[in-house]
Amino acid sequence: MPIKVSHFLPLFFLVFTQAGLHADDFPPMPGKRYDVGGYSIHMLCKGQGEPTVIIDAGLGDDSTDWFDIQNHTAVETRVCVFDRPGYGWSDAGPQPRNSLRISNEMEKLIQKAKIPGPYVLVGHSFGGYNIRVFAAHHPQQIAGMVLVDASHENQYEALNIKLPKHFDRKGNILVLPKADGTVSDKHRALRERAIHAARAEISSLYQSASQVRHNADLPKIPLIVISRGQPESLGRDAENRERIWLELQHDLWKLTPISQQIFANQSGHDIHQEQPELVISAINDVVNMSRVMH
């Protein structure tokens, strides 16, 4: 699941050990797999037209968490959502699982799938890191961007978040319940894969943040920043931490001169699940703005 400020409070640390998974345990694959250099990444594309929307999910989410939004936005243009290595129907990828590596994998995936630009990039939480690095490396191909309560490269220092330094690959892992305390209803096999893929990405978050800092420049593209309106922080300092989070979100709004910030007043971090209509509207708006500009 996506990384939150509250994700590093003791309340959310549980122990999980992955059970053995077999091919028969998985639901049918909805998209196609593409070899990106000895391992394959799953991607599902729907709709027609340009620009192509490419969605990168948050930490712990896979493509299935975005199918509803994809179905609605594919009415307007072509929309692709993929599983980062280790998630969904994608193979595990080489370590470390940082944003620069993921950006390079996105490039190979798009080439193998023969998806021409321009692209509107959508990133939720950690996905925001990945698409920003990709955009910095391919500025001429980027037509717009939507950041959904996206991670900021300075959030760990600003919020004094101490990430776990090491995970035993076969042992303990950070498991995060939903906001209401229930367990995800995602298919068991997909859920277990997501937990272990998230572990590897958590281990490299400091690297990813540094990579975003070194790839901070974005092209002058339409940008919509969607920020949560409901608090996620817990503890005595919760109000101050939420204030800092909103300041960081406002800083993301400054990434391009053609930008706006929208607040999801009924949502916490998982805006794509709690207020999907806002995300759908933002994607469509950026697609339409990019068409006018190009």
Image (cartoon, rainbow, N blue to C red):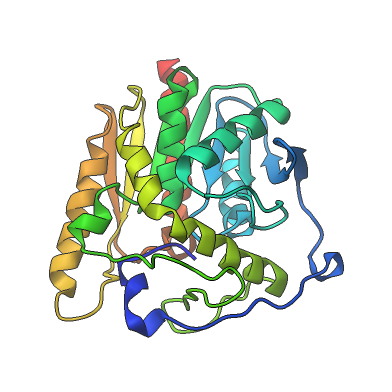
User: In the visual, does 99 lie left or right of 22?
Assistant: left
Q: Is 284 or 54 nearer to us in this picture?
A: 54
Q: Position of residue 267 (x, y in %)?
A: 36, 65
Q: Position of residue 256 (x, y in %)?
A: 27, 29
- Kindly give the residue lying farthest to the right in the view shown: 24
Write down the quadrant of residue 224 in the picture: top left
- Residue 148 in view (yes/no): no
Residue drawn where x is 40% and y is 46% of the image = 208
Q: Position of residue 259 (x, y in %)?
A: 28, 33
Write down the quadrant of residue 133 in the picture: top left
User: In the visual, does 156 lie left or right of 271?
Assistant: left
Q: Is 170 or 131 nearer to us in this picture?
A: 170
Residue drawn where x is 45% and y is 59% of the image = 203
User: In the visual, does 256 lie left or right of 211?
Assistant: left
Q: Quadrant of the C terminus?
A: top left
- Residue 101 in view (yes/no): yes
Asked if 88 appears above or below 145 in the picture, the reply is: below
Residue drawn where x is 67% and y is 36% of the image = 47
Q: How many marks?
A: 0
Q: Position of residue 219 (x, y in %)?
A: 35, 22
Asked if 16 appears above or below 51 in the picture, the reply is: below
